[in-house]
Image: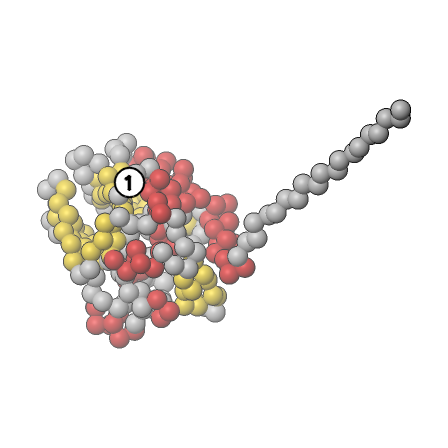
Amino acid sequence: MGKIVLFFFISFISYEQSEDPDLKTLKEREKVVEESLTEKVIKINDQFYMIQTFGGVAGNIGVFVSDDGIILIDDQWEVIEELILETIQSVSPKEIKFIINTHFHHDHIDGNKAFGKKGIPIISHINVRKRLHQKQELYPMGGEIIFQDIYPKEGIPTITYSSSMSIFKSDEEIQLYNFGFGHTDGDTLVFFKVSNIMHTGDSFVTYGYPFIDLNNGGSFKGFLKDF
């Protein structure tokens, strides 16, 4: 009896996850940051520092060194987590106790995705938390349309406030204020009352006229009213 040999051909089809074309500009910006961005530490006094960036779009990080840990204001990009941590450790080896978000734009708080995984509490205005649950189209700046994707659970603030909030660390009172519609609808101005130092996020800029995100609660009238 002849042998019958059966050949089974199994084709494996790989389905690559298609990238959202809306996020192309954001990904390009992220790549530039990953490849080119550098950090510089500016000392204000023994407790306060600013981490300034060069070579990519990213907000400055405020650093407050308290008796038992570090408080960060904004955290830049997830892709430069190691660079951020190295820069912070050059200031102090203490642990990060919590992070304050000044608003929801990616160049200021994309690092939430990295630091949230570490269990570090993130504080923001309530509207930041709301907006990070949805894909957002940012108002064009210089004709460039940028979409921001939904944030993962670990990147979303877990502590929020509506108009004002105070946090007490060491001998410092950290006051958080939202004055309504301005740069966005979720801006936070961070005022260290005892030291008389303020971190404003993008509610104050030095490069020219302020950018108002009209797609996300920003308002020229509100901005002028705030100041």
* Residue 76 relative to residue 9: left or right: left
Q: Looking at the image, is 205 positioned above or below residue 10?
A: below
Confirm whether residue 198 shows in the render: no
Q: Residue furthest front?
A: 1
User: In the displayed structure, does residue 144 sit left or right of residue 59?
Assistant: right
Asked if residue 22 can be seen in this view, the reply is yes
Name the quarter where the N terminus is drawn: top right
Residue lying at 23% horizontally and 53% vertically, measured from the top left = 160
Q: Secondary structure at mark 1?
A: loop
Q: How is the image coloured?
A: secondary structure
Extreme residue toward the right, this view: 1
Please state which of residues 49 and 162 is positioned toward the viewer in this rendering. Answer: 162
- Give the vertical position of 143 relative to 116 (above or below): below
Dividing the picture into quadrants, the one containing residue 223 is: bottom left
Of all residues, the one furthest to the top in this rendering is 1
| Residue beneath disc 1 | 120
**What residue is rendered at 41% in x and 55% in y?**
150
Residue 55: x percent and y percent? Answer: 45, 50
The local crowd at label 1, few if under 14, some if 14 to 19, many if 20 or more residues have their Cα within 10 Å, is some
Residue at (46% x, 62% y) in the render: 146
Q: Is residue 25 left or right of residue 127?
A: right
Residue 216 image position (x, y, % from top left): 35, 66
The answer to whether residue 136 is above or below residue 56 is: below
Res. 57 image quadrant: bottom left
Image quadrant holding the C terminus, namely: bottom left
Residue 120 x/y as whole percent: 28, 40
- Which kind of residue does numbered mark 1 sit on? Ile
Residue 75: image location, x then y, percent: 34, 47
141 relative to 6, above or below:
below
Residue drawn at the location 35% of the way across and 53% of the way down = 108
Q: Number of labelled discs?
A: 1
